Amino acid sequence: MTTKLFSTMTALLLGLSASAQGFDNLPDPIEDVNKVVDNTPDSIAKALMSRPAPGSSRKGNNPVLYLIGNSTMRNGTKGDGSNGQWGWGYYANKYFDETKITVENQALGGMSTRTFYTDLWPAVREALKPGDWVIVSIGHNDNGEFFDKKRARAVIPGVDPDTLYIGFNQRTQKTDTVYSYGAYLHRYISEIRAKGANPILMSLTPRDAYDDKGKIVRKPHSMWAAYMAAVEGVPYVDLNEISGQKLDSYSHWKEQYHFLGDKIHTSKFGAEMNARSAAEGLWQSQNPQLKPLQAMMKNVEPEVYRVDRSSGKPAVFFTGDSTVKNADKEEDGMWGWATQAATVFDESKITLVNAARAGRSTRSFIREGLWDKVYNSLQPGDFVTIQFGHNDICPITDAKARGVIPGTKDTLHVYHLDNDTYEVVYSFGWYLKKMIDDVREKGATPILVSLTPRNEWPGGKVERRDDSYGKWYREVVAETGVEFVDMHNISADFLDKKFSVKKLPADKAKAQAKIAQIKEKAGAKYFKKDHTHASKLGAQMNAQSMAKGLRANGSELAKYLKKK
C-alpha cells in the first residue's frame, strides 16, 4: 500500500461536510482545471431541495432507478434549464415505463466520484431496496486538489485499489483519505449489492473537444469504468463512446450546439442525445443481468414514418404548418398544399410523405419531436421540403411557445416561459439551418420553400413579405447554398395577375372598399375562413407553384413531377 501524508492546514472553514452544514455560507464558485465555473455548489441548499428525497418517487412496491452523477446529468441549481444548460438525467424517464419503475435523478452539479460518495450517497444508499437499480456515471469533476478549501473533490486517477493519500481536508476540517477512481466505484458497487439492488456502471458524457485525428476525445474514465465493471461482474454502458460516435457523425456546427456555455455542459439537444444514448446502451446490451430492466423500458426505438422502400423509390417529406397540411377532409374546408402534391408529382416514381403539422413553427416543430421523426426516417436520395413562417412571428413565451428570434444570425436566449419552464430560443434562420444540416447529414436533399401568401391586398396588390421572411430565407440560402423555391412570390404573382389593380381610387373610402372587394373575390376561390389558410383550389394552386419553382431551378426533385 502506498501512502502519502499531506501536511495539515490550520485555516478554518465551516466544519463538517456539505451534508451536515447549514448551507448558508458556502464558498464562492471557482474555475476548475477545465475552465468551467460550476455554480451549483454555491447554492447547494436550493439544489438539495430541488433534488427528490431518495426513494420518494417509489410507487407501491415498484423499483426505483437512481441516477448518480454530476452537472452533465443534472445541471443548474434546480436542473430546470434556467441557465440554458440541461443534464441528461432530466430526460431519462422518457425511456422507462413509469407504471413499472420510476427514475430519480439524484445527480448534483459540482460533485466528483469522491464528494458524491461522502456527501450525498449515504441518503441514497439508505433508500435502496431489493430490486432497485443504480446507474453510476460520474467523474468529470475528479480533478483539482485533494484537500483545498473550495472543492476538495479530486480522486487518484486509475483503478489501483491500494493507492491512497491521507491529508487534512480544509473543506471539512477533518483528516481525510482519498482513493482511486476505481476504488470509489468498487464502494458504490459493493454497497448497492449489499442492499439487494442492481449496480450499472456507465462512462461519462463526451466533451466538446477533438483529438489530433479530428474525432471527439474519449475520456480515460471509460477504460477505468469498463475495467471495474469486468472485475466486479456488473453491466457496463459506454455512454462516452455511443454519444461520441454520434457527435463524430455530425457537422462541426451541429456538434457545437449540443453544448452550451462551455465544453462540458450540454444544451437541451445534447442532454436529449445523451439520454437516448444511455437508453440505447442499456436496451442493446447483451448482459443478461439487464433483462429485468430492459423489460421496463419503452420508446428506445426511434419514431419513424413507415415508408415502403420495397420499390426502391425515393421519398419526399413535406414539413411545415397548416398551409402544408390542414384538416384536408371537407371539399369546402381548409387544405394544405402538400395534400394536393399528387396533382403535380408522379407517385409511380416517388413516395409522398406529408409530415407537416398545423399550428407549428420552426421552433415547436423541432421541440415536439416532429422533426426528429422526419430525420430518423431519411435515407440517402430522399428529399425534404422545409416551409415555415406563419407561426414563427407569434409570442415567444406564451402557452404555445412558438415564437422565434427574428433574423438569421446564430443567436439564442434563455426565456422564462409563461408555464414557468425555461427554453433556449434561437433565431428563425438558425432553426432552418439546423433542418438543412440534418437533412444533408442523412444524404438527402433539403429544399427551402417560402411561406404561402396571405389574402391581404395593401395598395391593391397581394401582400409580399419580402422584407422579413423573404429576406431571411435568402440569407439562409446565401449561407448554406440550399435549393430555394419561392412559393410566396410565385403564388403571389398568380394572384396578382387574377385580382390586383394597377391603381386604387384616390378617395380613401373607395380605395378601402376596392381592397375589400379584391379580398372577397380572392378569398372566395383560393382561401378559406381567414387570410392564411387555403381552399382546396388554393392548395392546388400552391402545389402548382411548387412545381413551377422546381422546374425553374432545374431541381433533382423536378424529375419526379408529372409531365405537363
Image: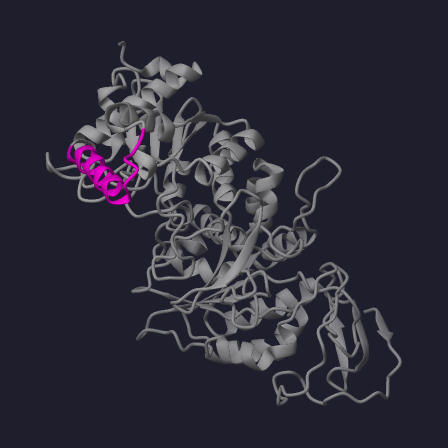
Instruction: Tell me the magenta residue range.
Output: 503-524
User: Does 317 appear above or below 458?
Assistant: above
The dominant secondary structure in magenta is helix
Q: Quadrant of the C terminus?
A: top left
Comparing 168 with 377, the one in front is 377
Say if residue 340 shows up in the picture: no
Q: Quadrant of the N terminus?
A: bottom right
Task: Point out residue 347 in the picture as x, y percentages from the top left corner.
Answer: 25, 19
Q: Is residue 554 left or right of residue 463?
A: right
Q: Quadrant of residue 70?
A: bottom right
Could you tell me which residue is drawn at 52 percent across and 72 percent down?
78
Q: Residue furthest front?
A: 507
Comparing 76 with 119, the one in front is 76
Comparing 459 with 145, the one in front is 459
- The answer to if 510 sits in the magenta stretch is yes
Could you tell me which residue is drawn at 41 percent across and 46 percent down?
366
Q: Is residue 224 left or right of residue 72?
A: right
